[in-house]
């Protein structure tokens, strides 16, 4: 089982099954949307999901 920590609230997330870089999940502690940045053995690096909107030339 792989583990990761939420970058916002430090909750520990236990990730079972296949985890893939770019996958999006929610923190059970604070509800923050997280993106898997790197999978390294049993540790997983997460970052807050940022959805960039279009600027329409402004």
Image (cartoon, rainbow, N blue to C red):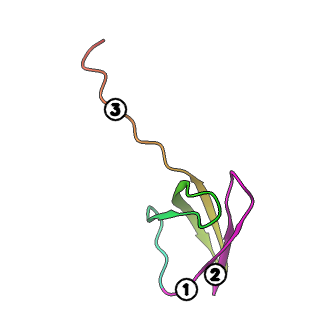
Q: Which residue is mark 1?
A: 16
Q: Tell me if label 1 and label 3 are in contact, CB under 8 Å.
A: no
> In which quadrant of the rendered view does residue 11 lie?
bottom right
Q: Nearer the viewer, residue 18 or 53?
A: 53
Looking at the image, which residue is at 56% across and 58% down?
A: 31
Determine the secondary structure under disc 3.
loop
Q: Tell me if label 1 and label 2 are in contact, CB under 8 Å.
A: yes
Determine the secondary structure under disc 1.
loop
Determine the secondary structure under disc 2.
strand
Q: Tell me if label 3 and label 2 are in contact, CB under 8 Å.
A: no
Q: Position of residue 1 (x, y in %)?
A: 63, 88
Q: Nearer the viewer, residue 57 or 31?
A: 31
Magenta-highlighted residues: 1-17
* Lateral position of residue 20 relative to residue 40, left or right: left
* Lateral position of residue 53 relative to residue 2, left or right: left
> In which quadrant of the rendered view does residue 41 lie?
bottom right
Q: Quadrant of the C terminus?
A: top left
* Lateral position of residue 46 relative to residue 35, left or right: right
Q: Position of residue 24 (x, y in %)?
A: 45, 62
Q: Mark 2 or mark 1, which is nearer the start of the sequence? A: 2
Q: Position of residue 56 (x, y in %)?
A: 24, 20
> In which quadrant of the rendered view does residue 29 lie?
bottom right
The circle on residue 53 is 3
- Label 1 Cα neighbours within 10 Å, binned few <14 / some 14-19 / many ≥20: few
Residue extending furthest right? 10
Marks 1/2: CA distance? 6 Å
Q: Which residue is mark 2?
A: 2
- Label 3 Cα neighbours within 10 Å, binned few <14 / some 14-19 / many ≥20: few
Marks 3/2: CA distance? 32 Å
């Amino acid at each position: 089982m792989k583990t990761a920590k939420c970058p916002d609230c430090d909750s520990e997330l236990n990730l079972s099954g296949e985890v893939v870089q770019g996958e999006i999940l929610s923190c059970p502690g604070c509800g923050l949307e997280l993106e898997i940045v790197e999978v390294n053995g049993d540790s997983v690096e997460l970052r807050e999901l940022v959805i960039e909107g279009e600027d329409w030339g402004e």
